[in-house]
Image (cartoon, grey):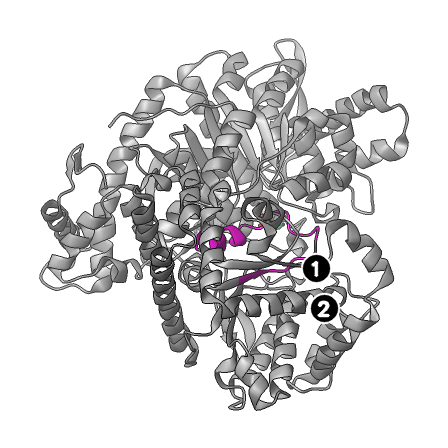
């Protein structure tokens, strides 16, 4: 690794040891002669934090001096997971810390387990943000992440008697060493009130007179790059009562109530909404969005004004990236600030806005797009509503000139939807005002052009692009699979792949090398052992390491078809039960692992979790089946669980009905770790096939263009028989809870089977059989595994970020000197 000493901090093991003890004594306030693992973790993390802060200061100073164009990444969600291992690795001082701790009688890996996950997000979109920050820092881009510092992260999943229960994730309970509270970086954020017409300098202008003010306080989370001194900032906002708060009640003597009322301001940043369409149109969610957007844009504009006095230079210095539509109010906010506060005229403000925003959508279905009820927006942010109306009016006028009086098209493209509930279409606002609209995979891009945003694509084809998602190899190999990391480095003869993942293709030439294969198998087996131990601790279940570890971990959703997986498992169980001894000997043993959270209000998804448990009970307790088949549900799936499970998986499943997964990033993490994929031709899988060849994964199911006809026709008869049999077993109460599962079974009846489980079932079973067959030949399987990892380079977020930097944001690297 690199750099033993820089700045004030010494990084030799002796100095690190002293430093850890120092923090145990003075920061944690425990005796340096007696402290437990958690206290050691706290001392250690504060010592790492010091080193982060030093580099972070240097980086910020460097950016200030150089004044490059910056990108601001606006996202309501980040799934950072744990920070300790990632930080010491990116700082290049893991080995030194490990040595320092050993002499104190501690193990780095054990202490790392003490840390809880930072889970300020739901799933794919949120973890993508985290991966992209790692790449932005590593590639030396002058970037800032902005988000919300929720006090409660994504709910914890508790399974009681097979049912999901949600528990609050009060994650800041034991303090958070990875953040720095910036008590002096605060901004007032205003809500409600009225808009009035006033004469300003003889000109009529609209003035917003807000009725409520809340203070936004910055919490900075340093994000270290790997192999660079650059350490960028993820700035998260927390809501605090404002000193401008109207304390009128003081005068009436109701001091206590006034204070209690003031305190309510904090609820704005208190809780992350679970990804659930039913939360659309909720006032608190809208307040969160604006609170976040207003604080972030004030901060961005303040930074710009520190060095510039002419807003026409703004687009040369600032790029704003909207992570989905959630931060799209930033558009109206920047317009408002430029016009109402900076006194620019409309055209000048509009010219600037059109040059700074880019928008990435993560949605596939038009029905899934965000809408804000006009009444709600008008009451919370009356001036913003006016501005959005004005943007829409001008857009509609322009559009009429281009497409004529095609009213149905005009109404489809309007930012304002006239329906039962008049609403603002956030996606239309984002498209109209952004210079670039990005999709997240090739298939997604096709869907955007031909379906979701067809009208807009026809109007502005040049705005539309895609950047295939990627994940960071630092977290998903180096942190989570250290033995595979070492093996790759050994065979490539360099660790340069950690910054340049394309080098992984160098493994291809050794894919059939007997020595590499042997070492590869060893690494994979040790990882399976770790996973098996975890499963045993969780459930008491002992699983065989010779079995194929078959994993599906992701949010539970009908379109992701965990139900298809479970029905396949029931089919397998049913077959094994009816086999004679000699056939049984040919069965490839499997450990099926499923994990994921269901949104709290999503009944069908919750039933899928319960079904998984009752099926597991039946299978795992049947001595007749033994090691041939096991089913485990891993509770409370999160980033740390993924880090443990992914390296131990032989096969991973990605089963979305074609046309439903915008990209999918889990598959990329499995791929990097040499896990084979069983997948539909959806989202990023299509591009994975381009990289590793269809012979190295198990593909099944209806193709994108077949889906509409299949939906009309229903499943064919042959498939129907096997499928109907397993569904019938559930309906007949074979697994108990007969009434409870009725509505779940109804969703896959021939005439209602929207996600096409019935018609894909036959092809799914064939792909599973092909996987079994391949697994028997372990050398061949290992070759496929090596080729999977070797072909994963394109799915690094480094590549994605470089494309964004060059093609969308127009920014350049700005590397802090060592
Ligand atoms: C909406 C309204 C109210 C509250 C929450 C939400 C909400 C929150 C999160 C809606 C959607 C999300 C997250 C969406 C998401 O994670 N999409 C996934 O993005 C990944 C990264 O691009 C893709 O790989 C996945 O295919 C896509 O499903």
Q: Position of residue 143 (x, y in %)?
A: 43, 31
Q: Which residue is mark 2?
A: 762
Confirm whether residue 458 shows in the render: yes
Residue 663 lies in magenta, yes or no? yes
Q: Position of residue 357 (x, y in %)?
A: 58, 27
Residue 463 lies in magenta, yes or no? no
Which one is nearer the viewer's eye here, 339 or 322?
Answer: 322
Mark 2 surroundings within 10 Å by alpha-carbon count, few (fewer than 14), some (14 through 19), many (20 or more): many
Q: Answer yes or no: do the residues labelled 1 and 2 have beta carbons within 8 Å?
A: no
Residue 215 picture quarter = top left
> What residue span does the magenta drawing correspond to?
652-673
Q: Which residue is mark 1?
A: 701
Report the side of 60 relative to 649 (left or right): left
Q: Position of residue 642 (x, y in %)?
A: 45, 59
* Residue at position x 65%, y 57% in the image: 656
Report the side of 263 relative to 401 (left or right): left
Is 805 situated above or below 50? above
């Amino acid at each position: 690794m690199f750099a033993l000493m820089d700045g004030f901090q010494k990084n030799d093991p002796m100095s690190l040891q002293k430093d850890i003890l120092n923090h145990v004594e003075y920061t944690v306030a425990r005796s340096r002669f007696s402290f437990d693992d958690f206290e050691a973790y706290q001392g250690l993390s504060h010592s790492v934090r010091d080193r982060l802060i030093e580099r972070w200061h240097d980086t910020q100073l460097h950016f200030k001096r150089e004044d490059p164009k910056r990108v601001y990444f606006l996202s309501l969600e980040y799934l950072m997971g744990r920070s300790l291992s990632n930080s010491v690795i990116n700082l290049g001082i893991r080995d030194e810390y490990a040595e320092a701790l050993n002499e104190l009688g501690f193990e780095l890996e054990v202490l790392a387990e003490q840390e809880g996950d930072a889970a300020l997000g739901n799933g794919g979109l949120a973890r993508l943000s985290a991966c992209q920050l790692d790449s932005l820092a590593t590639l030396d881009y002058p970037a800032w992440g902005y988000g919300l510092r929720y006090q409660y992260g994504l709910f914890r999943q508790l399974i009681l008697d097979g049912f999901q229960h949600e528990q609050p994730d009060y994650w800041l309970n034991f303090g958070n060493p990875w953040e720095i509270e910036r008590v002096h970086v605060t901004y007032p954020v205003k809500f409600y009130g009225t808009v009035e017409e006033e004469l300003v300098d003889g000109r009529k202008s609209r003035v917003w007179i807000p009725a409520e003010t809340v203070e936004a306080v910055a919490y900075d989370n340093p994000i270290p790059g790997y192999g660079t001194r650059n350490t960028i900032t993820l700035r998260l906002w927390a809501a605090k009562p404002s000193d401008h708060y109207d304390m009128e009640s003081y005068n009436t003597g109701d001091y206590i109530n006034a204070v209690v009322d003031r305190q309510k301001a904090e609820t704005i940043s208190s809780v992350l909404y679970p990804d659930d369409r039913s939360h659309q149109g909720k006032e608190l969610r809208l307040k969160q969005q604006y609170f976040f957007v207003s604080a972030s844009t004030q901060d961005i504009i303040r930074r710009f004004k520190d060095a510039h006095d002419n807003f026409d230079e703004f687009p040369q210095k600032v790029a704003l990236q909207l992570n989905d539509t959630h931060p799209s109010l930033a558009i109206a906010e920047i317009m408002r600030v430029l016009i109402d506060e900076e006194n620019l005229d409309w055209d000048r403000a509009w010219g600037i806005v059109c040059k700074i925003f880019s928008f990435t959508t993560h949605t596939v279905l038009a029905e899934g797009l965000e809408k804000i009820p006009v009444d709600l927006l008008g009451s919370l942010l009356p001036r913003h509503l006016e501005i959005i109306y004005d943007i829409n009016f001008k857009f509609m006028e322009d559009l009429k000139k281009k497409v004529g009086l095609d009213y149905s098209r005009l109404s489809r493209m309007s930012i304002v939807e006239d329906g039962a509930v008049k609403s603002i279409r956030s996606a239309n606002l984002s498209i109209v005002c952004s210079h670039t609209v990005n999709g997240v995979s090739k298939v997604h891009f096709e869907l955007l052009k031909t379906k979701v945003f067809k009208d807009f694509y026809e109007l502005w084809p040049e705005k539309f692009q895609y950047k295939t998602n990627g994940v960071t190899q630092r977290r998903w190999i180096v942190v989570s699979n250290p033995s595979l990391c070492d093996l790759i480095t050994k065979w490539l003869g360099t660790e340069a792949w950690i910054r340049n993942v394309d080098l992984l293709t160098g493994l291809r030439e050794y894919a059939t090398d007997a020595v590499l294969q042997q070492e590869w198998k060893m690494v994979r087996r040790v990882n399976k052992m770790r996973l098996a131990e975890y499963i045993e601790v969780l459930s008491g279940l002992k699983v065989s390491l010779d079995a194929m570890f078959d994993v599906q971990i992701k949010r539970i959703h009908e379109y992701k078809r965990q139900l298809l997986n479970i029905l396949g498992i029931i089919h397998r169980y049913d077959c094994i039960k009816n086999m004679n001894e000699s056939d049984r000997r040919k069965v490839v043993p499997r450990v099926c692992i499923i994990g994921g959270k269901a949104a709290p209000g999503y009944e069908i998804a919750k039933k899928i979790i319960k079904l998984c448990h009752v099926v597991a009970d039946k299978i795992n307790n049947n001595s007749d089946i033994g090691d041939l088949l096991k089913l485990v549900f891993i509770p409370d799936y999160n980033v740390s669980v993924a880090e443990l499970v992914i390296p131990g998986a032989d096969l991973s499943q990605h089963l979305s009905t074609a046309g439903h997964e915008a990209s999918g990033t889990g598959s990329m993490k499995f791929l990097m770790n040499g896990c084979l994929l069983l997948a539909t031709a959806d989202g990023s899988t299509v591009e994975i096939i381009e990289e590793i060849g269809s012979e190295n994964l198990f593909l099944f199911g209806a193709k994108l263009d077949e889906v509409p006809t299949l939906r009309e026709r229903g499943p064919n008869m042959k498939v129907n028989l096997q499928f109907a049999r397993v569904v019938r077993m559930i309906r007949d109460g074979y697994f108990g809870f007969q009434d409870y599962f009725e509505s779940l079974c109804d969703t896959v009846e021939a005439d209602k089977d929207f996600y096409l489980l019935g018609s894909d079932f036959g092809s799914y079973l064939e792909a599973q059989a092909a996987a079994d067959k391949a697994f028997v030949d372990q050398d061949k399987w290992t070759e496929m595994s090596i080729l999977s990892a070797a072909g994963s380079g394109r799915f690094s977020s480094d590549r994605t970020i470089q494309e964004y930097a060059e093609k969308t944001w127009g920014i350049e690297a700005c590397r802090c000197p060592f």
